[in-house]
Image (spheres, grey):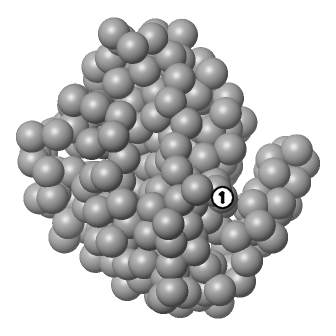
Amino acid sequence: MANDREATYLSTGPDDGPEALLVHGIGVSGRYFAPLTGNLARTHRVVVPDLPGFGAGGRPRPALSITEQAEALETVLHRTGLQNPVLVGHSMGCQVVTELAVRNPGLAAAVVLIGPVTDPDAPTALRQAWRLGRDTLGEPMHLNALVLRDYLRGGPRSFFGTLPHMLGYPLPERLAKVLVPVVLIRGEHDPIAPARFLHRLAEQVPDAEVLEIPHARHLAMAAHPEPVAAVCRRLT
């Protein structure tokens, strides 16, 4: 059983394949990566953690900062022996993998950010909640049910304890320090990560790519795993 500051993890796929680390967002767990995990595991060794505070991870008091979440992932990397993975983050997970890449300059093959947060045009919890509600109305019902179960499992203390850290994390400034290829992905209809925000982020990184998945929303990698998996394969 994990202690309160540990991330648990699932590891799957061929031991000798290229590597990927998939990091979830606030309130949820690695479970919603299942479609992408299954696709990538055909060719890649895939590690999917549950961050401390969420899913099967520990329940730290107080909730961990983004930097502390990245430190928890460093322990996962040590235990799994990942050497040169593509770091894939979703939503708040984009902040965590960015921090991980900055703290460990020689670690990653590339960084893939799906639906990154937090858009400075919606910097408050209330405005983020409004955008989340709009997104939820258009997501597939089975994904909404999975996310709701994870929210209930993690509980309000972890969610609301982590929220200020997410809202305050300086993603553009930290992303500018990433030294490996960066790809920014959003769903075409994602209200949480609008296109203008991704293009602002891309300005921080030389040669960063911005990709949009047609018909997708915030949970693009869960509803449309194939194009995300194709990006990961291209980068590794």
Depth order, front residue of 163/59: 59
Examine the rendered structure and indicate whether residue 152 appears above or below residue 41.
Answer: below
CA neighbours of label 1 inside 10 A, class few (<14), some (14 to 19), many (20+): many
- Residue occupying the far front of the picture: 1
Question: In percent of the image, x 55 and y 36: which residue is there?
Answer: 10
Q: Tell me how many marks there are.
A: 1
Q: Quadrant of the N terminus?
A: bottom right
| Residue 187 in the figure: left or right of residue 169 | right
Residue assigned mark 1: 55
Quick one: SS at disc 1? loop
Question: Based on the displayed image, in which of its 4 quarters is residue 196 positioned?
Answer: bottom left
Instruction: Name which residue type carries label 1.
Output: Gly
Residue at (35% x, 24% y) in the render: 19
Q: Which quadrant of the figure has residue 86?
A: top left
- Position of 200 with respect to 167 (left or right) is left
Residue 121 appearing in the image: no
The answer to whether residue 35 is above or below residue 129 is above
Observer-nearest of 46 and 128: 46
Q: Nearer the viewer, residue 56 or 87?
A: 56
- Residue at image coords 10%, 48%: 105
Q: Quadrant of the C terminus?
A: top left
70 w.r.t. 88: above or below? below
The quadrant holding residue 53 is: bottom right
Residue under the image location 28 percent in, 76 percent down? 170
What is the x, y in percent for residue 125? 59, 87
